[in-house]
Amino acid sequence: MTMTADHDTFGKANPVLAEGLKTVLLPAVSAAVLGAVIWFKATTLLPDARIVLIVIVCALIGWVATRLPDSLVALIAALTLVIMGAQPPEALTDTLGSQIVWLLLAAFVIAAVVKEAGLVERLVAPLTRSAPRVLPFFLVTGLAISATAFLLPSTSGRAALLLPVFLGLLAALPDRRLIKPLALLFPTAILLSAGGSLIGAGAHVVAVEAIDATGGPRIGYLDWLRIGAPLAGASVVLATVLIFAIFVPRDLQCARIVPSAQSGSLSSLQRRILFVLAGLVVLWIAKPMHGLDESMVALGGAVLLLLPPFCTRKPKEVFRSVDMELVLYMAATLMLSVAVVDTGADHWLAAGAISLLPPELATHTGAVVIFMSVVAVVSHLAITSRSARAAILVPALALPVAGLGHDATLTILIAVMGTGFCQTLMASAKPVAIFGMHESAGFSQKDLFKLALRLAPVKITLLVAFALWVWPDQLAELGPAELQSQPSALAASEQPLPRHQTTAATVASTPPSSSQRPMLRPGRTTAASSDTAPITRTISSKAEQQPYIIAQARSDLRVAHKQIKRDLSRLFQ
């Protein structure tokens, strides 16, 4: 009897043991193996850079393969960098004072006041008034979210301010199983639609500066709208259909949304709050005139809405609505991004990406377009800031590839537009974290993976199609005289590949020869080549590198602009 009982107990324990091996031992072994490979193979990197890459790989495994909360994994990774000496303690504490954190704090306060006043329900009532079916409702909602990209310049700010809209729509859902797809739709539409507007992301300004410096057309707000809006719109529509097909149960695909019962005119309190919100949008749009960044404008609006004419609750009660877990998570992931750039691991990764392009395909336009699209879409797994990805990929990947005989304007557009895809991990983008870590969202890391595996090929296909058949004609219309001075992307396959470009080390670590450089606009050759002193990356100057990553805030565009100019001078010397 005892042996039988012991056998039954062991049999019952086996599933627990197997689950423990799956969730603990396998991730630990994978992290140890990959860490050893990085440490012993990446010998060209400084020890600090190797430590950073190992920690980031371990964090990715922790986010994907374990049940630990994402915020805890991020904090452990950040503390590990400090303990191992790869980053100073200030690198972590300084991120808590970054402007993206202040933007989130202000947005949470604004959202709490708006929700308390019942304004959200009134604003979303038109979306549900006709009781549409699920797919049309999702499509209209996705396009409405996309329209905010032309008004609000920050994807993080858009996500934080649209969070109460998502919460207000929950009451209109006929079944709780629709919460997950709706929650996935919001950050997906926010991120993919940003590419349609010049102010949609700081990465776009990086692209415009680089295109102008390489002799391409001068792209303005309306020009970018013509180039980016069709791609952004197609991406949002296809992503919405994918979310509907993957996450909406079959028995709910024909269900109707519950119409809102809200009717009548706005109350005086709601009108006052709406007036303040409209003022915030105007101030965000007018940033070039007054110079205040998004976080300061949002903070001013939050303080104003806490005053008695707008808020009926005590400020202490409103402050309790701030999600501190999300704030700490943002701070930790920002530090990881800072560390990648600060130690030089970013350019090492870019050099590794170039090495994946076979020399015999380097002059083939289609192959290069596909290669650039894949690298741009995948880059969010290593670099979590969109502006940082653009500031790294443009000088370290797009311009060297253009130096092989391709149109620099086209390669820059591919690199920057591809960075808009970043839905694979909670840490990949701030809008994903804002919605994913909210208790009402209902989606997990597994759901993000399921969506990303299907959406990434769609995004890559759209990038390739636009780069080969749409953008060349649009760019020719913008500045035909200037574009004629550049190597044509369509005729690049006729140019032989220089022999000394067959290794990634040469492409990434040395300036291209004069025959390989993207041609400058006439009249700029002297200015660009006068700075003949080699530009080196100073790893120790951490104060100079940190601000543009903590970016998307304080010096997001200013330092990215400086980086572009510095790397361009290296290429053109």
Image: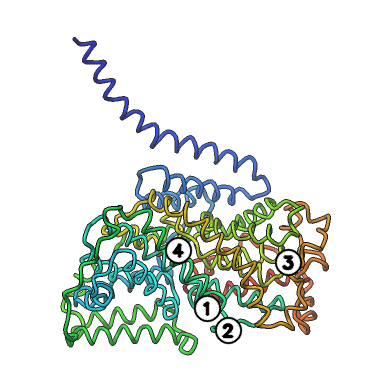
Q: Quadrant of the N terminus?
A: top left
Q: CA distance from mark 3 to mark 1?
A: 24 Å
Task: Label 1: state its secondary structure.
Answer: loop
Number of on-image labels: 4
Q: Is residue 143 left or right of residue 505?
A: left
Q: What is the x, y in percent for residue 279?
A: 34, 87
Q: Earlier in the sequence, mark 4 or mark 1?
A: 1
What mark, if any, has residue 220 been given in the picture? 2
**Residue at 46% across / 44% down in the picture?**
61
Q: CA distance from mark 3 to mark 4?
A: 29 Å
Q: Earlier in the sequence, mark 3 or mark 4?
A: 4
Q: What is the x, y in percent for residue 538?
A: 65, 62
Q: Determine the image quadrant of residue 23.
A: top left
Write down the residue under mark 3.
406
Disc 1 vs disc 2: Cβ atoms closer than 8 Å?
A: yes
Name the foreground residue: 288 vs 231.
231
Write down the residue under mark 1.
198
Q: CA distance from mark 4 to mark 2?
A: 27 Å
Q: CA distance from mark 4 to mark 1?
A: 22 Å
Q: CA distance from mark 1 to mark 2?
A: 8 Å
Task: Label 2: state its secondary structure.
Answer: loop
Write down the residue under mark 4.
238
Q: Determine the image quadrant of residue 216.
A: bottom right
- Regarding residue 441, the answer to whether it shows in the image is no
